[in-house]
Each structure stands twice: as structure tokens, then as C-alpha cells.
Image (cartoon, coloured by chain):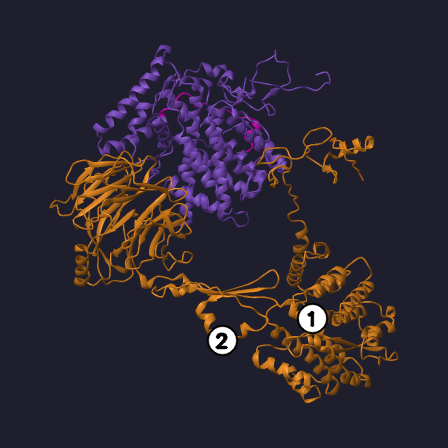
Amino acid sequence: MELGIRIPRPLGHGPSRFIPEKEILQVGSEDAQMHTLFADSFAALGRLDNITLVMVFHPQYLESFLKTQHYLLQMDGPLPLHYRHYIGIMAAARHQCSYLVNLHVNDFLHVGGDPKWLNGLENAPQKLQNLGELNKVLAHRPWLITKEHIEGLLKAEEHSWSLAELVHAVVLLTHYHSLASFTFGCGISPEIHCDGGHTFRPPSVSNYCFCDITNGNHSVDEMQVNSAGNVSVSDSFFEVEALMEKMRQLQECRDEEEASQEEMASRFEIEKRESMFVFSSDDEEATPARDVSRHFEDTSYGYKDFSRHGMHVPTFRVQDYCWEDHGYSLVNRLYPDVGQLIDEKFHIAYNLTYNTMAMHKDVDTSMLRRAIWNYIHCMFGIRYDDYDYGEINQLLDRSFKVYIKTVVCTPEKVTKRMYDSFWRQFKHSEKVHVNLLLIEARMQAELLYALRAITRYMT
Amino acid sequence: MEKMSRVTTALGGSVLTGRTMHCHLDAPANAISVCRDAAQVVVAGRSIFKIYAIEEEQFVEKLNLRVGRKPSLNLSCADVVWHQMDENLLATAATNGVVVTWNLGRPSRNKQDQLFTEHKRTVNKVCFHPTEAHVLLSGSQDGFMKCFDLRRKDSVSTFSGQSESVRDVQFSIRDYFTFASTFENGNVQLWDIRRPDRCERMFTAHNGPVFCCDWHPEDRGWLATGGRDKMVKVWDMTTHRAKEVHCVQTIASVARVKWRPECRHHLATCSMMVDHNIYVWDVRRPFVPAAMFEEHRDVTTGIAWRHPHDPSFLLSGSKDSTLCQHLFRDASQPVERANPEGLCYGLFGDLAFAAKESLVATESGRKPYTGDRRHPIFFKRKLDPAEPFAGLASSALSVFEMEPGSGSMSWFVDTAERYALAGRPLAELCDHNAKVARELGRNQVAQTWTMLRIIYCSPGLVPATNLNHSVGKGSSCGLPLMNSFNLKDMAPGLGSETRLDRSKGDTRSDTVLLDSSATLITNEDNEETEGSDVPADYLLGDVEGEEDELYLLDPEHAHSEEPEYVLPQEAFPLRHEIVDTPPGPEHLQDKADSPHVSGSEADAASLVPMDSSFSLISVSHALYDSRLPPDFFSALVCDMLRFYAEQGDVQMAVSVLIVLGERVRKDIDEQTQEHWYTSYIDLLQRFCLWNVSNQVVKLSTSRAISCLNQASTTLHVNCSHCKRPMSSRGWICDRCHRCASMCAVCHHVVKGLFVWCQGCSHGGHLQHIMKWLEGSSHCPAGCGHLCEYS
């Protein structure tokens, strides 16, 4: 201060706007495992970002996540380094995620990317521009991806992508789409060195927060009453008990009561249809922050419900094309080792459990986790033949569905209120856990559609 | 034994006939299974469940088991199996976790018999007991295997794999109570059907899911497994620990594996992704499939041998909605297309040669491979004479070594190091290089340089004495008056060069050389005597007719053995020069002299009786001086360069190209130049002549070459702690996560220029170190070393 240097001071409180700072692990108080993770993260990225600080609630997952991300961005791969970061920017910008965009703009410049490209996609090479369409579809309506999209990218004369490059790009796109979901879902605060992450004003003057504006999370929004938000406080105490009771019932009666085949089939359709009404409260289009918007051409293109629009898109059957059998083989063939890393990440995310639910211990949460996972896939039109979609309705209440749907489909619209209003008795770490499930399920869904299109192109 | 007799009757009763054929299904198939009598096949998929009769010429749809208006998930089959004892009994595994049995003997249209809804997740596999009529086994995604008795309504026993999903279950064919199951986590478990509490044995077979397994039909202990890791492994289960006896590496994840009947070592595989073919492997030959069926256009999902004792019919169903019958004799055999021979040079000119053993055996008698300076080493595989394919799988490897000493390329290294390519006037460069070549005993090259100098430099600069000196032996008759001189080239140098360049086929290169030099002579003779263009072959005879006995044998011999060798054209340009030479008496004398000279130097050669030769060249200085511009010669010079390049002396070609620069470049097409440059650079780099190779790259004008210097200019740094390369950033190691280079002065990480003392290896920021050493001469790290900054 004496030297006349303006010292930036952090805005916001801690790495997340949704989770009180004191709930989050303080750097310095971590155990040995977390410490190595932090060191890994710092070494790989040259920073300890807020995403890492929030994810460290689940160190087992974080380790796999960092390993994958590091491999995607820095290790051997078909794409040059600056392309990778630029694709990350493109993907994050689809969800107007200024946090990720800012981070990767820095990285992009650091690995020698051309600053001109940052003025918009039209300044980037034709090859990357071609990827824009895939990015758009993949982010919002992945079920519309066809082999023609793939063909268009692979056969564009001198601007064409190779299959290996395309797979790398697809993995990056899906990774950043879902990471954007996480960023909004957990309300990650901007980094101190990024726009909106710091202020030069003395701390007393203002508690103005840039990111609140970009996310439409200011007080006016708080007043909008979410349709599911008005559960009385007393009810919330029984929420957990009710949920556990339902799980118990389902567990018991599953063997006895046999739903007819037709009913099972229709339950999926019902759930699919219902998922679109879940979203009701806000349709107002938040204008994206300026610096981000230049990266995507078509702001009007957003998520449309799988079941809402007129044309009939056939249901994606997991039994016919699944990650374990098909997707993995394809990715590993074209981009060796990454299939393995992503596979591990999916496994950890899907199987992660501490056998706790809020204040209860020794609970088998597999049913609940499976319901969340399958609900997300259901929103993308992916169906498991062996799943009774009636369970979803039993286990996931409305406010939770609203949150899931918003995080997965339109993450930029997530508000603190949504975050607070579901699972009120649950711990923050459990809500982060939910977010991990959401982003991995979303990533897998997008990957499945993209890889299926590539497979179809190849055959 | 009962089974055996039944089989023989079945085979005896109806001999299987058929052809390669396919039929279109309405929907993609997921699995197929064959009826015991080998006359019917059932195809099951998400929306298909039909029985086809296999007739001689075609498949005929016999029965559609998908009845009822409402599509039910119970009919969405992941697997199907036909009972091998009871031809009316089938079982399917549905994607929604239901196991259904079908009785074809039912009178109604709906053949559905029983429904087991005990599994919570998709059932991946069902399997009937091979001899028991009522026992059915299922394996599901939920990690459980269930054993059903078809006479009861629910499962008899449940086996928990204690892990993720079960991908395959197979009853052992020989052990009544045993079955194997494979898992998504890579494990294989062996169970006793009477003991559902724990498995008998468990081992990890693959990295990643094991999709399939199959017991060997004859060998009690053999189990083949296929996994996502693209491998098929054959395990011997009779020993205490499961032992891997064979391993086949395929190109895609293995979805199904089936032993081929009556062929002990054969198995068929198909893949789940990417690859649509069906392969039949001989497990002892794991790199080349014995047979390959390429009919399908999408992934093959089910394979089955039509009859358990007939190895020639294979049935397959695919996602491309076709059902195929493949005949083994119609299969394509990749072995047939494989190159039976392989050839490779070693670092020091050794030559390794691998070939099918039969080829080597027949030819070794004829060809002089076992000559005195070559030492073939044979590796012979032990063969099993009983096996039909054994002969294919063996090859012999011979290694031919270079004769000690003959591999010396010192002349090349010396030349490369001492040649001057730029930075001086052309005349000086030529003189210098001529001198270098002469000192190394390469007279032809030396002469070439001298000639180039004469052609391209002002003749006034050339002192006649110097020229005469360079001519060497036998040219005392150079007449200053006529301003002409004689060049004579001794071939021994050239001859040995060529031999070294091509470590194989000495006779060949030598004959070529002899031919060319002989041609030179004969041409000269010819010009002088007749002055007409006569084909070289004829001229050889001419020489022969004269006095040169020494030359006779070899060119003749060469021509009889290598009739395809045409005499090199390169000799002719020189002749053109001679055309302009005014005939003088001295030539005759020269001609008489030269054979003796060459004969005296012939000792350098060891292999061929004659590899010394010479060329006699006369150049008229005056003629060029008076009326010919240097351009006149450029075509000749280009031909000369090509001559050298074709001889293998690409060094000369490139050196001349660089030295002459613009003067000749335009006359030789880019591609050829590039080719020469790359060959020369490659050679230089093999001899570790990095500086020279870099100079050549720098001096080249070809874009493709000069950009070699621009590529991979990254300097890779190794971490000072773990000694491994630091890939992402220069100052922090990805592996040990430590900052590699700390500044000894400010103790911060150095991200830019790092300077360090070579004595104590401490260093830091350039600025800091400079400043520090201004004030102190000791190392800033405090190690006590007296550092010096210069």
C-alpha cells in the first residue's frame, strides 16, 4: 500500500458462494492424502483453484478427476496444447461460465495461444470453427448428434479433423460442459486473479459481487419463490426420515409387487415427460456477460426438453450402446489411456459412498445414487431396460429435481436458493457429492451420444 | 459315452452340407444358438426372436417366437441358448433382468414356458447344463449368478460374485459340477454348483471386463477367456494355480470366443466394437489369424459352430441384421497374403533375413549364403509334426555379418568433415575439395572437382602446372601449347566405396562399376578410333578384342548373370567432352598406360578379381575458353551429379550441389534434390556428424530441407531430482512436484534464463548471478566454489 501498489483483495467468502467458508477445508489443515492432492493439483495447474478446494470433500474422486484433467490438458495427445485450452473455453462459454473461461484464457495465453482467437470463434482457425456446431449440440441437445455431424468434421478438406483429434476434442468438450455444471452447481467463486474475483476497494466499502450479477443471483432473484421452495421448516426435519423410509419400502416391496411390462415401459415415458415440467419458474433469458458471449455464435440455442419438441427421437438404450462395452473401447482405441482414466472416474463417481445420509450412518445409498444417475440419463433420453423408473418419483422430490435439472441442463440459472432448498438436512459434502454424480452422469450421457455417432460413422 | 454315440449317429445320419450364405433379419441380432441336430438356429435380439432352418442353399424362417401385440421387454434378449440335450428347450436372458424359458413342444402359438424374475439387473448370459436336462444357469449385471431347476418356480441356488456384473457363465463340459463365471472387474471365478457360499477358485484374467469364456470341448482343463483388453487367453485349470498357456492379441475387445470343434488349438473370436470380422486363431500362432470371415458390415454379436463335431461350418449373427453361414474353406487366410520374407539392416551393416523355413531350405543349397565371410545363424522352432498348421508357423532367421574392417567408412567421415561447402570463392572451394578427395585417394572425385572448377571459373586463374599435377600418373604428355590436359581416374577408391555403401551384393555393385569404367574406356577408344556412337555392349567386346585381358572376365560374367543391368548412362556425358577434344598422339599413349596402372592398384579389392578400373578423360581448356559459356556444361554436370547419386555417393552429389549453388540448381528438379539432401543428412546423422549435417541443412535451398532445422527446436529439460523429463513446464516437475531450478541468489524459481556454474552446478537468474559475481567470486549458494562468469 505504501508503495502505491494496489493490492487486490478477494471478493466473496471462500471458494464457494453456496457453502459457508467455515464448512470448507482450510488449506493447511488437510491430512496427508489431501495434502498430496493439493500438491498434485498445484503442480499440474500452477494454482490451487476453488474447484479443487470444493471437490476435496471427496478426495478419492478428486484424485481421479485431477489425473484425468491433467492428462487431457497436458500429457500426450493428438491436439496441440493451445487447442485444448481453446476447446475448454468454447465448451465453458456455452454455459456462460466465466469462471472456467477466465481460467483457461490465462492458460491458453500461457501455452502460446494467439490472443486474437479470444476475440471470438470467427477469429480462430476454420478447423475450430467447425467444431462450434458440435459443441452447441453436445452441450444442449446431444441426442441430435448424427453421423453427419461427424462426417462434416472429418471430411472438410484441409480443415478436417482426424478421428483421434475428434475424440480428444469430444472428451474435452464434455469434460468442460460438465465442469461448468459443477461450477454453477456448487457456486464456485471466481479466482482472485480473474475478473470479478477481486476488488481494489477497501473491504468496508462494498460487498458488491460481480459473479452474483452474471449469475442472476442478486436479491431480486431471491425473492422469486421457487415452486418447490415453500416447504415449511418443520417439514424439513422429516425429509430425511421420509426418504429413508421410502428407500426401505422400495427395497422390501421390490421382490413382491411386480409391475407389468407395459407399466415399466410407460414409467420411463412418464418420467421423461415429467422432467420437462420440473422447470417452471424462470424462463427469463439472462444476458450473458460480454467477455464470454463472443465465444459462441448462437445464444438462442439452449436446452430443449428431450420429450418436448415435435419430432420423435428414438430412445437411447444403454443395453445397445454402453460406456463399459462400447464407448470405452472406442475412446481407448483412438486416444489411448484416456478411456481408462475416464472409466475409472465414472466408476469412482458412481460407486462413491460413505454409507451415511445426513445424520444417519450405515445406510445403503446405492438405490438413491442409481436413481439420481438414471434420472439424469432419462433427461437425455437414455433408458436402462432393467430400471424401474417409478423409483425416481419415490426418491427424488420436486425441489431436488429442479436443482438437478437446472444444474445439468442450464447451469447458468442455478441460484443459491435452489441449492439451499433441496435436501435441507443434508451436509454440504453430500450436496457436493450429488454434484459429482450429476456432472459425471452428464458427461457420460454426452459422450455416449457423441461416441455412438462416431461409431455409426465408422461402420 | 452316451453322448459320443449319439453324435456319431447324428453325423452318420445326415452329412452336413451347405455353402457360404447369409440371410437378412429384420433387426440386429444380439446372440445366436444352434440346435443339437445342427439343422436349426435361433437368433435373438432386442426386437427379434426367430428360428431359422439351415437348408443347403439358404436359411428358411421357421418360427417367430415374438408373439403378442404388445412389445415386452421380456422379449428384448441379451442372450439365447438352445439346450444341447432337448431340442424343444430354449432359454433367453432379457435386458430387464428376466430369464425366460421356451418350450417348442407347446401346442399354442406362444411357446413361452417359464419366467424367472429374480435378477434385479440385466441378465447377460444364460447357460444350460451340458448333460442335465433341467438345470439352467444365469449371470446378471447385479453381480449374482442363479441356478434354476426348470421343474421349480424359482432358483435353486444363488451365487454371489461379490463384485460387479457377471458377463459370462459356462458349465464345464467335462466336470459335472463345475462352472466358470467372468466378471466386469477382470476376474474369473470357478464354482462348484453344490456350494453356493463361496467360489472354488478366483483369479484375475484380464485388465478390464472379461466378456466371454469357453471351455475346451476335449481338453478338460482348458478355458479360453476374452476381454476388453483385446486379448484372448487360454488357461490351464488343472494345475493348482490357473496357468496362462496361450495368449492371442487381437485388434479390438473380444466379445465372444468359441473353440473350433475337432481342432485342438483353434478358436473363433469376434469383437464388440470397431472390428466386424470373425477370426479363427491357432492359439500357438498368436499374431496371424488362421482364417478370417469378412462378410459382416457391422459388429458380429454371436458366433456358433454349427455342429459340435464338424469344424467347417460357422454361423454368425450381427448388428447389421444378417445371419451368416461361413464355410471354413471360403475363409480368407491372412497368412497367404503375409510377406513370407523379411529383411533388415543392422546398425553396423549386418543384415538379418527371415523367411519361411521351406524357402530357405530349398534355396540355401543353390545360393552361396554360407560363404566364407558370412556367418548365418539359424533359429529353428521345434515343430509338432502332427499339426496341420505347424509348417506355416515356423521361419528361419539368418544374420549375415559384415566382414571385419570392410565396414569402415572413414573416407566418408573424413570427406564430410574436411570438405568446404561455402564461405569462399568457388574456385577455392573446388580446389580445396579436390585436394581433400585426392588425399583420401579418391581420384575420380578429385578430378571431378577440378573439372568443375575449370568449367565454372575463369580459366585464366587455373595454372597449367597445377592441373598437370592433379592429373597424376601417366599424364606427363599434357601439352601446354594446346592447352589441353588429361584426367585419369583410378577406380579402386570408387570401387571400395561402392562396396561399403552397399554391404550386400558386392558382386553387383562391382560389376556395375566395372561396366561403367569399362565403358568409359571403350568409349574413349571408340571416339578416338571411330568417332561414332556405338552401343556399349558392343564396345565391351571391342575392348576385349584389344589388349585388356584383365577386364574380360568380370564384365562378361556380370552380363551373363545380371542381364538386366544396362550400362549406366552417366558415362556418356564425359564422352561428349571428349568429342571436342582435338585428337592428339598423347591419347594413344595414355590408353596404353592406364591398364597397367590400374592393375597395379588392384590389390585393394578382395572379392572380385577385378574391381579396379579407370577412366580417362581429356578436357580441352581452350575450347571452352574460346566459345562455351558455363551454361553449356550444366546438363553434363547434372548428369554427373545423378551419376554419383545413383552410385550411392550422395555425398558428392550434395556437396557439388551446394558448392555450385545457383549454377546448377535450376536444372535438377526439387524432388531429386530433396531426396539427395535427405539421404545425405541421414547418412551424416548415422555417423554422428551433427555439425556437418546441420551445415548441410543450413546451406540447402530446398524448403523442405531447411525447415528441418526449424522443427523440434524445443529443448527438453530433465528434473534435477527425479531425473525424468519435465514435460509441461520447464521449472516444475510433473512427477515429483518439485521446482527444479532455484536461483541461488534470490531462492525463487527460475522461469526464464537460467545460468549455472559448470563447476559446482549452482546457478540462478542470469541478472542475479551477474550481479553477484561482480561483488564476490564465491558461489552464491555458499558451496565454497570459486565460480567464474565469462
Q: Which mark, by number, is residue B639? A: 1
Is A74 left, or right, of B306 in this rendering?
right
Q: Which mark, by number, is residue B365? A: 2
Residue B462 in the image: state x and y as whole percent: 86, 70
Inter-mark Cα distance, 2 to 1 = 42 Å
Name the residue type under label 2: Gly
Residue A300 seen anywhere in this rendered image of the structure: no
Name the residue type under label 1: Asp
Tell me if residue B752 comes above or below residue B524 in the rendering. Answer: above
Quadrant that contains the C terminus of chain B:
top right
State the residue in front, B235 or B530: B235
Tell me if residue A220 comes above or below residue B329 in the rendering. Answer: above
Other residues around mark 2 within 10 Å, as few (<14) / some (14–19) / many (≥20)? few
The magenta region covers: A277-295
Q: In the figure, residue B426 lies in which quadrant?
A: bottom right
Which residue is depicted at the point 70% across and 68% down?
Answer: B641
Q: Nearer the viewer, mark 2 or mark 1?
A: 2
